[in-house]
Amino acid sequence: MRAITTIIFDLDGTLLDSSPDIFNCVNLALREMALPEVTMEQAKKGIGPGSQVFTQTMLPRDQFYRWEELLQIYRRFYLDRCTERSTLYPGVTALLRHLRNGSLAEAPYLAVATNKPRSMTDRILGHFGLFHQFRVVIGPEDVVRLKPDPEMIQTILRVTGSLPEETLLVGDTDNDIRAGKNAGILTCGAAYGYFPRERLQAQDPDFLIDAPMQLLSVLDGRLSKA
């Protein structure tokens, strides 16, 4: 494997466990709409693929047509509460510090590609002091097509001037792995995130890790391909 010059991270389920705040705010919105609340498991299933799929995952089938209403109410709650209970996954802070200042021959560019709206992403990255860690952050407002389309990845490649074969995407869902493959870059599944390990493995990522710090073993060649 060639030396990795750019690492692209998903946000929810990869850097951040945002499920407690998402779960709380979805149920606050559903309560306001006089609709049944969801379980944490159901909330996690909707994280990642974009706004319409996310909200319809939370709604009873006969209420799918109200997805935009739910989205508007949910965002009102979430923007104010998106950092109340969310936490970085254990090891993320140390991993990012090592990637920027560690023993690698050359510090790679670090980037974020997320389907999460920019207003929420910016607030979260600011709260956790992560803005300075990333060369570029790409969200839905920056592209026409969301993951699994490769447009986000291609945008990052243009900004950084990186080659696909020297770029690695780390993400916890099928959309992440497919976006990476569609862009022709290397992929690493974050099996500690929201997607079941076996379903993530079925996407045939190049690598699979069970904790953030295992990414260092990928980069130095100690972790074999998935």
Image (cartoon, helix red, strand yellow):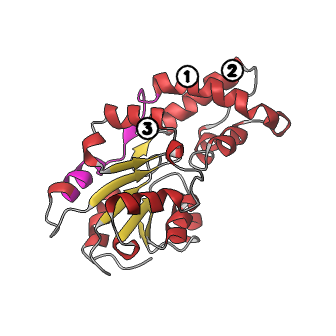
Question: What residue is drawn where x is 34% and y is 73%?
Answer: 166
Dot 2 or dot 1, earlier in sequence: 2
Amino acid tagged 1: Phe
Quadrant position of residue 101: bottom left
- Of circles 2 and 1, the one toward us is 1
Q: Is mark 2 on a helix, strand or loop?
A: helix
**Residue at 32% over, 48% down:** 90
Q: Position of residue 31 (x, y in %)?
A: 69, 20
Label 3 with label 2: CB-CB less than 8 Å: no
Disc 2 packing (10 Å; few <14; some 14–19; many ≥20): few
Viewed as shown, does residue 1 lie left or right of 35?
left
Disc 2 residue type (three-letter):
Arg
- Look at the image and tell me whether residue 172 can be seen: no
Amino acid marked by disc 3: Thr
In the image: residue 55, left or right of residue 190 = right
Residue 42: give its label.
none
**Residue in the foreground of this view, choosing between 164 and 217:** 164
Q: Mark 2 points at which residue?
A: 31
Q: List the residue tagged with mark 1.
A: 77
Disc 1 versus disc 3: nearer the observer: 3
Separation of disc 3 and disc 2 at Cα?
Answer: 25 Å
Q: Is mark 3 on a helix, strand or loop?
A: helix
Residue 224 image offset from top left, x and y in percent? 36, 79
Looking at the rendered structure, the number of numbered marks drawn on it comes to 3
Does the magenta portion include 89? yes
Span highlighted in magenta in the image: 82-99
Residue ID for mark 3 = 121
